[in-house]
Image (tube, helix red, strand yellow):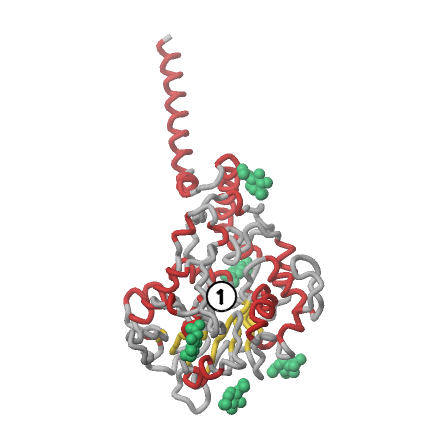
Amino acid sequence: MASQISRIFLLLLVMTVSLVVFILSQESLLKSWTVFSGKHELRWENVFFDINLWGQEEKTAVAETPIPLLYRGNFTKLPQWDFDDVYNQDAPPRPTTCAHSLRNSQDENFKKAFLPNIRLFLHKDNINMSEWNRLSHFNNPFGFMDYKYDDVMASVKLIPKPKEPLLLPKPGGDGCVHCAVVGTAGILNGSKVGAEIDAHDYVFRMNGAVTKGYEEDVGNRTSVYVHTAHSITASPYFFGKYGYKSAPHDEGIKYVLIPEGMRDFQWLEGLLKGQEVSGGQFNKKWPGTYYSGQYNESRFYVLHQDFLRYVRNRFLKSPNLNKRFWAIVRPTNGAFALFLALHTCDTVDAYGFMTDDYMKYSNYYVQKYIKTRVIFYANHDYKLEKNTWKDLHNRKIIKLYQRMEPESGTEKPK
Ligand SMILES: *[C@@H]1O[C@H](CO)[C@@H](O)[C@H](O)[C@H]1NC(C)=O
Ligand SMILES: *[C@@H]1O[C@H](CO)[C@@H](O)[C@H](O)[C@H]1NC(C)=O
Ligand SMILES: *[C@@H]1O[C@H](CO)[C@@H](O)[C@H](O)[C@H]1NC(C)=O
Ligand SMILES: *[C@@H]1O[C@H](CO)[C@@H](O)[C@H](O)[C@H]1NC(C)=O
Ligand SMILES: *[C@@H]1O[C@H](CO)[C@@H](O)[C@H](O)[C@H]1NC(C)=O
């Protein structure tokens, strides 16, 4: 009898110890679980799978198949992963020859956040299955959540590896790359900074970048045009009445695409194949015709999901990412363009970006004759961006064009 009781006791002990060991071994799983905000029943399976996959990957380094789809709709706020803030980086594009480059800033906050060699561009040679699976955890434009491997890869596999860095110092200059980034804000109306903008080595523009008829205030050169499939197709409609006919197309211009969603991958496939788009919102449109003859594969760049996510995570993390509409919340095209300049230029002057006194100006600089109000769309956190530009200016990372003129009237740009 006694020996039977002790045997049962021993069995129970062994079972308890095994259970404790099992629970401890699953600790990482439990940790992921607590930060998870989606609907529990289904997510459990995915988390489990995920941990297994990543655990396995450490050993074998190759995952052969795409992970099962993760759906945006299953999360009530931005999901968090322990590899959220891990990014691919590239070798520096060139030796720094500029002593006063923003890269040499001694500002502690900036130094902590800034990754000078963050991977900027996506192309066919820097994506593989483990990259796909990693990026599938992030919603668009920060990754491929909700998207099918074949749908996206059909176009990513066509993107050539850029042969040159986006920008190089101008020959005969001071070794620095000086850039102006020109937003579309109303503050530029009547500013007369056109010549100052054009005097930079490179001028970045985005969205409805009308210059004809506005040269005195906004300049006339465009060296880098940042766009999405939506912005390049919609701008002629929105800005047509202000004189916008087509995207900027200066000789030798570089085009940069923000792949914000599936429609951009469909756009890319048509563009890179020299065909019409097959399927989706831009079905039957000819992407090649939107660049006024200046499209050339060797001057076309596609932003990398890691770069877009890094900009959001480290510089523009809106509290709206915790709201139910988190999946549409992202920095503006202007913000991505400005950060692209911060990573490809030595000095950056920003014009036409939102400032504290935005209420004094129209929404867009093209709105000269009627004073319009600045429109706040739910997918962007404009106030956060406005404060970020001001902060970068105060830390002397960028120079932000502001017009804090006295109420008396005479303009005194700072
Ligand atoms: C997750 O999202 C998918 C696709 O929208 C849907 O079919 C599924 O029912 C969702 N699961 C849960 C648990 O909400
Ligand atoms: C996949 O691509 C990543 C990022 O470019 C790279 O670090 C990794 O070594 C690649 N993995 C394989 C198995 O090629
Ligand atoms: C645009 O600038 C011009 C010249 O300074 C000014 O007369 C006009 O009122 C401005 N338009 C708006 C809408 O502020
Ligand atoms: C911009 O304006 C300058 C000065 O008027 C002119 O020389 C130049 O050709 C113009 N550039 C473009 C791209 O229109
Ligand atoms: C694109 O640019 C390359 C490099 O400058 C040039 O050799 C090529 O002829 C251009 N292609 C077209 C179609 O203009």
Expressed as whole percent of the image width and height from the top left, the position of residue 382 reads 41, 61
Q: Quadrant of residue 6?
A: top left
In the displayed structure, 191 sits above or below 314; it is: below
| Residue occupying the point 46% across, 55% down | 378
Tell me where residue 72 appears, x and y as whole percent: 53, 47
Q: Is residue 187 above or below residue 49?
A: below
Q: Is residue 374 above or below residue 60?
A: below
Q: Position of residue 120 (x, y in %)?
A: 48, 68
| Image-quadrant location for residue 384 | bottom left
Please, what is the three-letter code of the amino acid marked with disc 1?
Asn
Residue at point 59%, 50% (across, down):
66
Residue at horizontal 62 percent and vertical 52 percent from the top: 148
Side of 206 where 294 appears, left or right: right
Residue 269 in sight from this viewpoint: yes
Screen quadrant of the N terminus: top left
Quadrant of image for the C terminus: bottom left
Label 1: element kind: helix
Q: Quadrant of residue 238?
A: bottom right
Badge 1: residue crowd in 10 Å (few <14, some 14–19, many ≥20): many
Q: Measured along the vertical axis of the image, is residue 231 above or below residue 164?
A: above
219 on left or right of 290: left
Question: Which residue is at the far bottom?
Answer: 172
x, y percent for residue 290: 64, 72
For the image, the number of numbered tags is 1
Q: Which residue is rendered at x = 55% and y = 74% of the image?
A: 242
Residue labelled with disc 1: 333
Q: Nearer the viewer, residue 90 or 151?
A: 151
Asked whether 290 or 80 is in front, the reply is 290
In this image, 278 relative to 74: left or right? right
Using the rendered image of the protein, determine whether residue 169 is visible from the camera's viewpoint.
no
